[in-house]
Image (cartoon, rainbow, N blue to C red):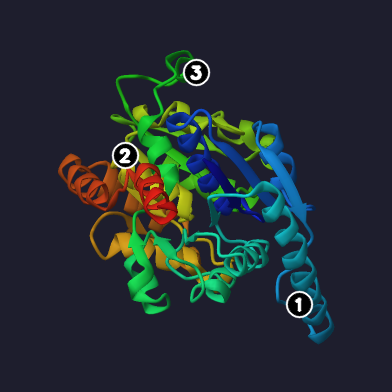
Amino acid sequence: MKICIVTGGTGGHIYPAVALADTFRHLYPQCEILFIGNDDRMEAQVIPSLGYQFLSLHTSGLVGNAFQKGRAVGQLVVARQKAKGYLREFGPDIVIGFGGYVSAPVMMAACSLHIPTMIHEQNSIVGRSNQLVMNRVDAIVTCYEKCEEVFPKNKIHLLGNPRATIAQKAPLDQAYYDSLGLDPKKKTILVMMGSLGSSSVNALMKDALGSVDTTSLQFLYVCGKDNSKDIHMFDDVKDIHVVDYVDTLKIYKKMDGLICRAGATTIAELTALGIPAILIPSPYVAANHQYYNARQLVDRHAAYMIEEKDLNADTLSQTIQTLFLDPAEMAEVSKNARKLGKPQAAYDMISLCESLIK
């Protein structure tokens, strides 16, 4: 079996694609996997470092002024022709696109060569690249029902994000967990704010977390590598353990709650594991998709949400107490989150691939 996977731009597109590839490789050790991505984005370093074959294209998003958009269209045309050459030479049984603007020309090329095709949409708001090819591909895998507002309904398969499978299977690394110096007798709340990890927000976090009764709670706060200077800001606050980075897959099994952004990968992981969460969507993303990702959980009482415009020490502290200091509420939110989880996502996608290849 030969699989071509197209992905790029951000980790939100790349890591679900890698999760699917890893599962393919586990189930079919002899299968050949080719990744195609941009030559100047993070996939050009990440994918080869994981031992996968990688070929590159040069594309840009359809944004900016008329000249920039025109240049992007020209790049798309050139990339489509180059992708045709890659696909003819590799001869894949199926081509799977995970979004990012590099995905569109490859999927177009695959369709023109009559190769079976599938695209994956990680978010509740459909990305522009997937919209460009949605009427031409054979199958569309989604994570949220909201995507039915855009995609052709007869092509949709609500299977979830392959990262859910990886998170659900990931074993606890006891030595790594022990190295963090946490109290195993207390509930642990993992706080990961991503791009919010600025000094001003770290100060907000100190005020909010420091005002919570930590008799039964402790916080593992990831301040971000760019803000490692702020690690000592919390030295005088009890039960807040600060690190600049944490490998979440190694410790998820010991986490009782999350305070985090509402990116597609994070939500796929926390729902697969049933971890109750306070979501703080980033407003700095395309079409405000993190808000809509979070909304899907909040409407089902599967998470709490604080919009960034409403984020302050008081609102965060109060929400922490409402959710994490009430065992019955934590259990209810956990149960509802798990109902939305798709821990078999990677396996279900592979089954769909097999049906398309036949």
**Residue kind at label 2, given as amino acid type:** Leu
- Helix or strand or loop: what does disc 3 sit on? helix
Marks 2 and 1, how far apart in space? 41 Å
Q: Is residue 113 left or right of residue 238?
A: right
Query: Which of the pair 242/21 is nearer the observer?
Result: 21
- Helix or strand or loop: what does disc 2 sit on? helix
Pointers 2 and 1 in contact (CB under 8 A)? Answer: no
Q: Which residue is mark 3?
A: 176
User: What residue is at 40 percent from the left and 22 percent from the top?
Assistant: 172
Of label 2 and label 1, which has the lower sequence position?
1
Q: Nearer the viewer's eye, disc 1 or disc 3?
A: 1
Q: Nearer the viewer's eye, disc 3 or disc 2?
A: 2
- Within 10 Å of the Cα at label 3, are there few (<14), some (14-19), or many (20+) other Cα atoms? few
Q: Nearer the viewer's eye, disc 2 or disc 1?
A: 1
Q: Position of residue 115 (x, y in %)?
A: 55, 60
**Residue kind at label 3, given as amino acid type:** Tyr
- Within 10 Å of the Cα at label 1, are there few (<14), some (14-19), or many (20+) other Cα atoms? some
Q: Quadrant of residue 76?
A: bottom right
Q: Position of residue 343 (x, y in %)?
A: 32, 42
Q: Is residue 65 above or below residue 88?
A: below
Q: Position of residue 326 (x, y in %)?
A: 20, 43
Q: Which residue is mark 1?
A: 73
Q: Quadrant of residue 244?
A: top right
Q: Which residue is mark 2?
A: 273
Q: Is residue 336 left or right of residue 195?
A: left
Query: Which of the pair 337/157 is nearer the observer?
Result: 157
Q: Is residue 116 above or below residue 25?
A: below
- Within 10 Å of the Cα at label 2, are there few (<14), some (14-19), or many (20+) other Cα atoms? many
Of label 1 and label 3, which has the lower sequence position?
1
Of label 3 and label 2, which has the lower sequence position?
3
